[in-house]
Amino acid sequence: MTMTSPRFHAPYLEWAKKRPTPRFDLANSNILPCSIDELPGAREAIAFDGKNDCGYAPLIESIAARYGVIPEQVTTAQGASGANFLACAALLEPGDDVLVETPGYDPLLGAPRLLGTRVNRFDRDFADGFAVDPDRVRRGMTPRTRLIIITSPHNPSGVIADPAALDEIGWMAHANGAHVLVDEVYLDASTASARAPVKRDLTAATLGDGFVCTNSLTKSYGLSGLRCGWILSSADVAERIRRARDVVDGTGSIVAERLAALAFTHLDRLLAHGTRLDRGGRYGRVSAAAWHRRCDRIRRTFAQRA
Ligand SMILES: Cc1ncc(COP(=O)(O)O)c(C=O)c1O
């Protein structure tokens, strides 16, 4: 039997999984994995039993407290990847239109395509410092647009979306019967420093009911192995997401969710670990201001060569 190539192809991820492992890997977006001994109490926390039908309650409560929402607004998922997929599955019907940023992270195109929707694109421009421009979003929308997908910090530029721009997009989406999915998987590492922990109000989830925000313990906390992701949304959307999960993977791993709950009691320590590595120059974390300076330098260099 011959099979056609899938409509949900994610070429970047395929490359990332198949490429040879170099000795010094500058292309990986994870921080150094946290070892079991760097998470105090991890060995004792391992257990195979516990109730987590709708997420392990201590984990749900910790996520809610960390980001300033109520537990009913939190759903857990298999990493930010699973969170993005579940959010799409809960909010989209075949034949809907979805608007996704360019350049972007290819699973964010693949997930809505897998669900039988049509993906349109809007540009985040190098010349504008990769800002999210509400006018471009407006021009990219159709009457059938049901979801607008943005990353903040942006993959690949690292630029954090201006809350005022997101707010404007939220109102446009609302008028169109759409939601805004903001993938915030790099947010905590980008907004925290050793002295000032995560600024909770930066999550777009607090902008209003139309926002659906995804995140995980992967990028900022070095815990990719736990596959602990979550979605912050309105309570109504969270309930739809839980029902979507019933048919995708049922529930998360209680072993991983227990460890994730423990990790939430040590997040600042884990973040500091990542930040220390970062300051050591192992990873290139760039503030928005530094990014703009860098863009200006690149633009000047190109202008001189032209
Ligand atoms: C924008 C974005 N979202 C999600 C992910 C995947 O995160 P997780 O490991 O939590 O599934 C990545 C990983 O590169 C990413 O860049």
Image: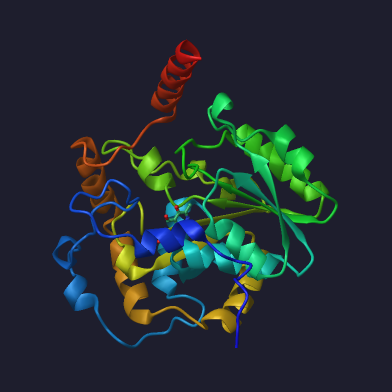
Where's residue 147, x and y in %?
70, 55
Residue 119 or residue 159, whichever sits in front: 119
Q: Is residue 184 above or below residue 11?
A: above
Left or right of 305 in this view: 27? left
Quadrant in which ligand 1 is drawn: bottom left
The quadrant where residue 73 appears: bottom right
For residue 187, say whether it is visible: yes
Taking the spot 56% from the left edge, 43% from the top edge, the residue there is 103
The quadrant where residue 177 appears: bottom right
Task: Return the residue found at the far right.
Answer: 143
Where's residue 43, x and y in %?
17, 75
Residue 22 or residue 219, whichever sits in front: 22
Where's residue 94, x and y in %?
76, 70
Taking the spot 29% from the left edge, 63% from the top edge, the residue there is 263
Task: Return the residue found at the far top.
Answer: 304
Where's residue 49, x and y in %?
34, 88
Taking the spot 48% from the left edge, 19% from the top edge, the residue there is 299
